[in-house]
Structures are given as structure tokens and as C-alpha cells.
Amino acid sequence: MNEHSKIENMGGCSEIPVLKERGQREVFCGLTGIIWLHRKIQDAFFLVVGSRTCAHLLQSAAGVMIFAEPRFGTAILEEKDLAGMADAHEELDREVANLLERRPDIKQLFLVGSCPSEVIKLDLSNAAERLSKIYFPKVKVLNFSGSGIETTFTQGEDACLASLVPTLKETDEENLILVGSLPDIVEDQLVELIKELGIKEVAVLPGRDRETMPSIGKKSKFILVQPFLTDTTEALEKRGASRINAPFPFGEEGTTLWLRSIKENYGISDDKFEIVTSAPRKRAQLGLKKLRTSLQGKTIFFFPDSQLEIPLARFLSRECGMKLIEVGSPYINRSLVDKDLELIEDMPVISEGQDVDLQLDRCRENNPDITVCGLGLANPLEAEGLTTKWAIELVFTPIHGYEQAQDLAELFVRPLKRKEALLI
Ligand code: SF4
């Protein structure tokens, strides 16, 4: 075992030990979050202050937009900026002025930090404050970091949402806020179910534009839909809101337990819960039943990537009958995933962080039926004969809620079918 690796017991009721590793990592940076956030927040623009590498990453991950003007871009730091020979703040102000003049549709501007802007210690919070004074109320200017120095790709969304929280309007009214970005159709399904349970004031962070951002106060409650929102959770709690703790809404069981936590918090009757959830639950159960035979008993190994690993492992083991070998996550916030961890029964290795060579050795040794990993590892592992699933696909595909339970299971059936087809 590497000297950086050690087993730590997480304590609490789950008693699942965690293998902590601090070695070389293979993950995307937080800029990746802009790809789904710019679609979600429709009056926002994400201006990355970074290098040509950052611009290439965004462009290749997002594809070229032909029909619409993109709502993200990169203010490129040139060598003279990096060498401290130019006033990067002045240049940034000029870029922003040009952008906002050209694009009156922008109502929220995010200045997004990157590795280069952090290395030269460009203070974007200062810049956002200065620019806010100039452009408010027409445009709200915020900042967050998408740098890959110490983070992983879903932390970009966490940092973005956390930057929004201090700007949310104060309210004395009770409301429930769903936190985390989802495809609109999935978000609508979950909000609809909650409203049918009898809760009328339901909002979502992030809202689809500045007008629909939630209000918040001491009577607000919130529930996460994504497990990677540590900083956002802290920011919401700082504003006085209280979190409803629940397993994440993946699969039939996960969605039911997630909704049940809301039901219990609001004192909704069992009868009402049954009426609202029984039909979609049955649909999800039926969809999963069809696929369970393909996944039952198959082994799976998760490399750390999206922080979705623990809730997904719970879904795959309990609802699909898969056997977990290792569940790696870049960062485990025990208080956010404890409800999922408690439900994982077959005691796999749970690992946090990464030492990629050691983890590759463990993976090869176990020879899993499916390996969930980043793009960089997938091709070499496929060449070695392992069947892989790209972790990033799980973030880009609608997988939450009852109606997506079957699709989620199918994402894991497909690589197995492909492998079978190749063997024939
Ligand atoms: S933020 Fe850092 S890791 Fe991400 S593309 Fe730019 S230089 Fe690379």
C-alpha cells in the first residue's frame, strides 16, 4: 500500500471504512460544469478568465453552437498578463464592457476563475464587486472558480450555486427549495410530485433565470438533488435554511425515500403519499424489472469522478442486484451521502481521492464486469479487455426520478450488451 493511502473508519452508523488516497488524479476540472449550467440558467453568461487550454476544453466539450450565440466564452490571459506586465483588471473591464454592449440579453454574468487566473492571483471577487457597481441593476456580476488545481468537474456547479446564494432575496415565508441543476423536464416532474403532496411553495436553485431564483430565509427548507453540493449547502445554511437529509433520487427506491423524507418533514399522511407516488413507482419498478436480469450479479468498479458514485452504487446494488467491488469518489462529504451509505449492504471498498496507478492495479486484479471511469482511463482499459462506462455521461444524461429509473439502469446494460456483441 502506498504511504499516502490509509484506511479510515468513517464512524457513525454505517461503519463503512474509507480508503483515503492522495496521489495522481485523472479528473476533469470545474469548467466542465459550464456546459450544463449555461443551458440551465438562460439569461446568464459564463466568462472564463483563463488560457487557450481552458477555451479549448470548453469548446470541445460543448461542441460548436451553430444556431445560437453561445452563453459562455473565454477572456484569454496572454503571456504579458501571466508575466504581470499588463493590468489584467483593465483588460477584463474592457472585455466585459464589449460583451454587455453586444449582448443586452445577459442579466447574470459569472466571471469564472481558472488555473492560470489563480496562479497569477487575479482577484475575481474584487472584479465582480467592481463590475457589479457599474452594471447593477441591469446585470448582476458574480464570480466562482472552475480551476482544476484541487477540484473535480462537478465542483464547478457547486461553486457557481454557492456564489448565487448570498444574492438570493430574503423571505419570511415558508418554502421548499430543490438544490442542484437538472434537465428541465426532470425538474418539472419532481416539482409536480412535491406539489401533489400538498406543498405549494416549491422553488429550484438554480432558477431558470434571474426572476425565478428562489427567495430564502429562516423558514426555508431545502433538499439536494445532487450529492456534490457541499459549499452550496453551507451557504444555504448560513442564510438560515435547514436541509432535509435523504438518499438521492436515483431509481425507484431512491426517489421514494427522497420524497418520503419531504413527506415526513411536512407531516403529510401515508395515504396521500401512496396516492401520489404509487403509479410512478409501479412504472419505475416495472422498467427496472425488465433490466435487472442483465445486471444481476455483475460486478462493478467505480473510479472517482463525479461524486455521484455513492448514490449510484446504492441504486445499482439494491435495485439492480449488481455486486460492488470498489466505489471511488473524489471527495466524500459524509453528512450529504450518509443516507445512501447506510443502505449499501455488501461492504465494498469505499475510497476517497485517488492514486491512479494503485487503483488501476486493484481494478485489474478484480477484473470487474463494468468499470465506471473518466474518458482518459476508458480507452486504455477497453484495450485491456475491460468494459467501461464514461462517468461524465451520467452527469449529462437525465437519470433522476421515477421516470428515468429504467434509463439509468439501461446506461449500465448497454456496455455489457456491446461487449457480448463483440464476443459473438
Ligand atoms: S481551468 Fe485548469 S485544468 Fe481546467 S482547462 Fe483551464 S488550465 Fe486546464
Image (cartoon, grey):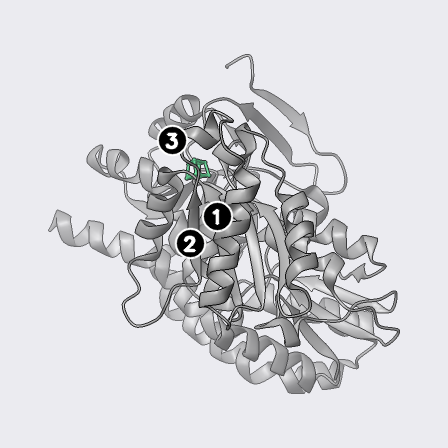
The label number, if any, that marks residue 48 in the structure image: 1
Q: Residue 149 carries which label?
A: none
Task: Give the secondary structure at mark 1.
Answer: strand
Q: In the structure shown, which secondary structural element does the residue marked by tag 3 occupy?
A: helix
Q: Quick one: label 3 or label 1, which is nearer the N terminus?
A: 1
Where is mark 3, residue-wise?
363
Q: Can residue 339 be seen in this view?
A: no
Task: Check disc 2 and give the amino acid type.
Answer: Gly
Horizontal and vertical percent position of residue 273: 70, 81
Picture layout, residue 279 above or below residue 399: below
Cα distance between the residues tagged 3 and 2: 38 Å
Give me the C-alpha separation between circle 2 and circle 1: 6 Å
Q: Are marks 3 and 2 in contact (CB under 8 Å)?
A: no
Ligand 1 quadrant? top left
Task: Identify the amino acid type marked 3.
Answer: Cys
Q: What residue type is labelled 1?
A: Val
Q: Can you say whether 420 is above or below 305 in the image?
A: below
Residue lying at 28% horizontally and 60% vertically, measured from the top left: 64
Of marks 3 and 1, the one in the foreground:
1
Report which quarter residue 265 is drawn in. Answer: bottom right
Question: Does any portion of residue 129 appear in the rendered image?
Answer: yes
Badge 2 crowding class, 10 Å Cα cut-off, few under 14, some 14 to 19, many 20 or more, is some
* Pick the front one: 139 or 338: 139
What's the residue at 70%, 63% (across, down)? 223
Q: Mark 2 points at which residue?
A: 73
